[in-house]
Amino acid sequence: MSIIFTSAEAAEEAFYDAISRADLDALMSVWADEDEIVCIHPTGQCLIGALAIRSSWQDILANNPRLKVRVKRNICWEGVLFAVHSVVETIFLGNAPTPHGPMLSTNVFQRGANGWRLLSHHSSTAATSAITDPTTSESPEGGQRTLH
């Protein structure tokens, strides 16, 4: 029996925890049991379906068994059945002190009979100046951002 995630946040935490442990089965248990789940990596490769997504993550985890992702949530939209999280990922490989990124990612979750599950993970590289703190009107560099 699979784990029932009681919130989109719990599913998201399990997703990133599975990456940090290089646990492919745990990572795939977060995904929805749908034919058209989608994962888009920073390379632009669009993967559709559990088999393609599993194969891709298997390669990533095999080549980077000590991959750590620090996640900061920017914006979350949550409804009764769907949640969309915009996050900033900072990636650390092995013991390297220098991070890779930042990466901007969007995680889409759906609530069903088996709890919350991931429908889509879309990640892309970002310029540092493109990231702002939603709780302030400043960019990470301290400059003001324009609010429309």
Image (tube, grey):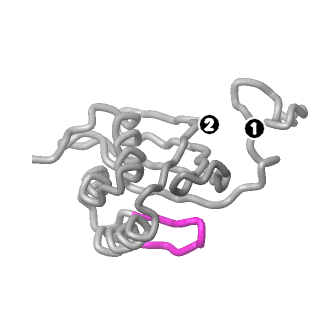
Q: Which residue is mark 2?
A: 74
Residue occupying the point 27% across, 37% down: 5
Mark 2, residues whose alpha carbon is within 10 Å: few (<14), some, or many (≥20)?
A: some
Residue occupying the point 38% across, 44% down: 17
Mark 1, residues whose alpha carbon is within 10 Å: few (<14), some, or many (≥20)?
A: some
| Secondary structure type for disc 2 | strand
Could you tell whether 132 is left or right of 8 in the image? right
Disc nearer the start of the sequence (2/1): 2
Front residue of this view, candidates 3 and 38: 3
Q: Which residue is mark 1?
A: 132
Quadrant of res 13? top left
| Secondary structure type for disc 1 | loop
- The percent position of residue 127, horizontal first and vertical second, equals 77, 54
Residue 16 vs 94, above or below: the answer is above
Residue 1 vs 24, above or below: the answer is above
Give the amino acid at mark 2.
Answer: Asn
Give the amino acid at mark 1.
Answer: Thr
Could you tell whether 144 is left or right of 56 in the image? right
Quadrant of res 100? bottom right
Q: Say if the magenta span includes residue 42.
A: yes
Could you tell whether 139 is left or right of 104 in the image? right
Front residue of this view, candidates 28 and 116: 28
Quadrant of image for the C terminus: top right
Region of the chain picked out in magenta, as a range: 38-47
Between the residue at mark 2 and the residue at mark 1, the CA separation in whole angstroms equals 8 Å
Q: Say if the magenta span includes residue 142.
A: no
Report the residue that reaches farthest toward the front.
95
Residue occupying the point 90% across, 34% down: 143
